[in-house]
Amino acid sequence: MKRFEGKNVVITGAAAGIGQATAQRIAEEGGNIALIDINAEGLATTKEIVEGLGAKAWAYECNVTDGARVKEVIDQAAQDMGGFDTLCHCAGVLRTYHTHEMTFEQWHQIIDINLNGTFYVNHAALPHLLKNRFSALVNCSSTSALGSHPWMAAYAASKGGILSMTRALYQEYVKQGLRANCVIPGGIATSLHGDFKAPEGADMELLKGAMPFVGFAKPKHAASVIAFLASDDARYINGTEIRADGGALS
């Protein structure tokens, strides 16, 4: 398939995990990609992968919690690529705490990266997306937005906010040709989930309801859903979400 031939795509969280896998998938399908991440070394690796597949790539180091920097980078990406019509926002962080022990600073860090970061990226990208007759925006939420995940109050709140915000964007901009959807990954073996560590004294039985019966999948399995939602194959899918969780919440 070459669903992204002639398309310019912006991907955040592109240095590793689902973001990197999404960049590879879209490059395989002919898309040119602006890669954004805080990890410069990982960005360089992804850029090499994309260019090795024959696609054009631009890399931009950026912390998504810095709204001014996000706007600067996305405006520069639009200039470098000659505009873009697709955004895949994959940047995020996972931390676990007993909620009553969580500090205000820990709460704000998760909300700032996941929820505020999504707003900053979407906010900066929208003026460029809306210049096109049709455009696509895909945000990454989580099964924690729909199911019950212990020790993840801040993470779940941030991911639930992303889901609701994406639905609102669909309603607001559908008549201007924007499709806005969410992918809901769960049980994906990424570095983010590899960093998962239950807080001290946690009862791991409480986590069973969030785990897929089929075992953990690879980042490419979430990337394939993101690529689908971003492509014209999903032209009639808007303002909703697709779970890629191995049936964990079924």
Image (cartoon, rainbow, N blue to C red):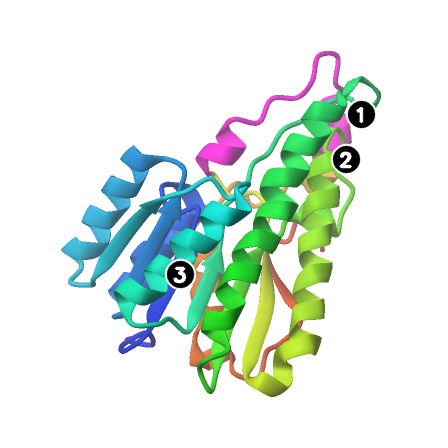
Q: Amino acid at mark 1?
A: Thr
How packed mark 1 is, by other alpha carbons closer than 10 Å (few <14, some 14-19, many 20 or more), is few
Q: Amino acid at mark 2?
A: Ala
* Residue at 35% in and 72% down: 83
Which disc number belongs to residue 153? 2
Q: Amino acid at mark 3?
A: Asp
Task: Look at the image and say whether residue 197 sits in the magenta stretch.
Answer: yes
**Residue 237: image location, x then y, percent:** 59, 78
Of residues 197 and 210, the one nearer the viewer is 197
Left or right for 226, reference 176? left
**Residue 178: image location, x then y, percent:** 55, 78
Write down the quadrant of residue 176 in the picture: bottom right
* Residue at 56% in and 45% down: 214
* Residue at 76% in and 32% down: 150
Question: What residue is disc 1 on?
Answer: 99
Question: What residue is disc 3 on?
Answer: 75
Left or right for 188, reference 199? left
Residue 8 in the image: above or below residue 222: below
State which mark lies toward you, 1 or 3. 3
Task: Look at the image and say whether residue 77 sits in the magenta stretch.
Answer: no
Q: CA distance from mark 1 to mark 3?
A: 38 Å
How packed mark 2 is, by other alpha carbons closer than 10 Å (few <14, some 14-19, many 20 or more), is some
**Residue 6: image location, x then y, percent:** 27, 78
State which mark lies toward you, 3 or 2. 3
Which region shows up in magenta?
190-207
Q: Which quadrant of the rendered structure holds the C terminus? A: bottom right
Furthest toward the right, the residue is 100
